[in-house]
Image: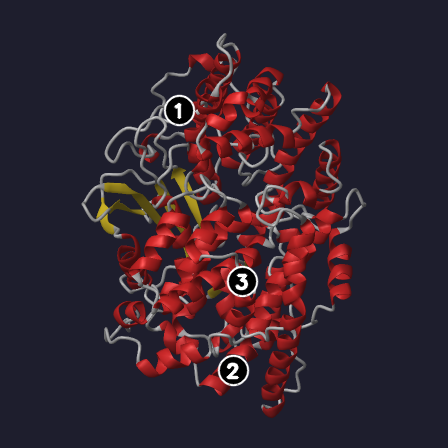
Amino acid sequence: MGKEFAIAAIALFAATGSAPLMAQENPTTIASDNALIAEWTGPYGGVPPWDRIETGDFIPAFDFAIAAARADIDAITSNSAAPDFENTIAALEKSGAALTRIQNLFGVYSSNLNVGDIPDIELVVYPKLAAFYDEVNQNAALFARVSSVYNGKEFKKLSAVQQRLTEDHYKGFERNGANLDEAGKKRVAEINQRAATLGAQFTQNLLKDEETVTWIEKQSDLEGLPQSTIDAMAQTASANDRPGVWAVLNTRSAVDPFLTYSDNRALREKVWRAFVNRGDNGDAEDNNAIIRETLKLRAERSRLLGYPTYAHWAIERQMAKTPEAAMELMLKVWPKALARVKEEVADMQAIADAQGAGEKIEPWDYRYYAEKVRKAKYDLDFNEVKSYLQLDKLREGMFWAAGELYGFRFEEVSDAPIFNPDVRVWKVLNKKGALVGLWYFDPYARTGKNSGAWMTEYRGQQKLIGDIKPIVSNNSNFIKGKPGEPVLISWDDAETMFHEFGHALHGLNSNVVYPSQSGTNVPRDYVEFPSQLNERWLMTPEVMNRFLVHYETGEPLPQALVEKIKAAKTFNQGFTTVEYLMSALVDMKLHLAGDADIDPDAFEKQTLAELGAPDEIVMRHRTPQFGHIFAGEGYAAGYYSYLWADAITADAAEAFVEAGGFYDRKTAKKLHDYIMSVGDSIDPADGFRKFRGRDVDTSALLRDRGFPVD
């Protein structure tokens, strides 16, 4: 069931305000071979039964699975034998198998197929899960057994891995209210149930805003846009039943290229405003009231649990340990990034002035003029590079690099069910031809699918109840082009592909015993390290020369373009860093504010003003659309994690450079042995020390971004 049951275990996706469906009265009547709860069968150690799922079965199946998980807990607490590691900690790790399976299946539906009755089902399911995990966390008999193992004489005889697991379980109970009195436990449970509903509503509101489009009806309004972007806009219009015109979908993958290349400034502003105001339009989908209540609830729960603020609770078990440590790193980088932004804006303004535009650079101009500066400074037009960025060839490049680093071989299969025709599946084999796991790829946008890109774990690796192989997926939101033609993506999207594949590789490389220590189940501010490091292989000559080939001629990316890309590596890092840090700092300050009555829009504006944020840039995720922190609690008071992990990444990348290249076998083996395969079975800081031979050098982050090092 994992280590911190109540909060981290529930991935809150979408819900609507419509009437919830009724749960079945007697969950024990569900057939044991029901696809939603039964053990997975078929090839590869069992596969998700996407071909046998009926959405109407979710609620009764959840009821059955929760009842079965409750029975597992009862079996542990009623055991007459004295508590020990095997009958308590290991037994907890084995418990709730059916519930884990259905949660994973439903999570995929929520994030990829959020249509039909799924939003209504979420309103029932997520509060049920919150209630059940509170029940587990507040189970006095269970906590007593865990405490007995943790505080007992036998603890020192356990292996280091078992000691770490036992401590994680113990701390998880403590952090979620096991030591509270009955009134405190009751209130925590009430807060968690309400938070579950609010998180679901937040995402559903955001999904509705992201399904809107900006219509373009005149050919002249397409000036400046590359043909691939125009084709994608035409495809979007057709998908919205208006063939013959063009539409910009209100998601990052569609908006960013439009803002980068469109010559029509008024349309750029219109598209930009629609995007940055998602969840903030004062209508039925406005998220501000949800945010205000969520922050209040988080602050109250944190006080009940003995923490001064939610940020202190959230960061305690991360690598940073304290909000102060996270803030220290962010504020070390912030002034250097601000200084770079001033230089970037001056360069852009000079071009605008030289063209006689008579325009002051505004947020909807930043990407547009940045691209012109890139062209002027480096003679680099990423639209030209895009002709060499074929989706399928990039995927092949990811596979090849993974083979060089970890000995993996990928073979596409057709005998695993899929939930949509766009999904493809590969089996992953090691050097000896033995099965490592499965990788699913779902690349295209669709109605009801979350925006952005992510990795999902369908099944985690473990050896506690057999040699269980991992099943992972990567999901993106690329727009299909014309039928039969390759899909061309941007350089940023190519980096994102490698990033998310890094998460998948983290899951596939896992080689641990206990489920809650496997794969990506590591501290939040460490989990982005393997993925951010994997981005580096995109720019290796081996990948660029073999897999970045022109979609028409098949010729590799010219060396002259390669050199320009390398020369421009730190270009626009002011914008990239400030855009991110604005979101990370606002996130942290929101969760350090305690029980203050917060107006999200006003707080955002005031905080950015106090930080001296530039007018030309907005937060990467404005507060009303900040799903990382309000669609659940995954990155709440933790968006700083990307910078923390990037500091580790920059230092790790220098290890490969010092060794002679990114395919150095000794360095790759250390990466595998101490980072990619161990999950949370060791302290991440210890793992990094074994990899690097010392603690992290955060100055590597400044060097990597081209900022001055003090």
Give me the C-alpha separation between circle 3 and circle 1: 47 Å
On the picture, is 94 further left or further right than 170? left
On the picture, is 259 further left or further right than 306? left
Label ID, residue 109: none
Label ID, residue 37: 1
Do the CB atoms of the residues marked 3 and 1 lie less than 8 Å apart?
no
Q: Amino acid at mark 1?
A: Ile
Q: Amino acid at mark 3?
A: Asp
* Above or below 114: residue 490: below
Give me the C-alpha separation between circle 2 and circle 3: 35 Å
- Within 10 angstroms of label 3, few (less than 14), some, or many (20 or more) residues? few
Q: Residue at x 42, y 68 (%)?
A: 490
Nearer the N terminus, badge 2 or badge 3?
2
Give me the C-alpha separation between circle 2 and circle 1: 55 Å
Q: Residue 493: tell me if it is visible.
A: no
Residue 684 in the image: state x and y as whole percent. 49, 47
On the picture, is 540 further left or further right than 164? left
Q: Which residue is mark 3?
A: 697
Q: Which residue is mark 2?
A: 372
The residue lying toward the viewer, choosing from 169 and 68, is 169
3 vs 1, front mark: 3
On the picture, is 452 further left or further right than 334? left
The residue lying toward the viewer, choosing from 319 and 284, is 319
Residue 131 in the image: state x and y as whole percent. 60, 25
Quarter of the image for residue 141 reads: top right
Do the CB atoms of the residues marked 2 and 1 lie less than 8 Å apart?
no
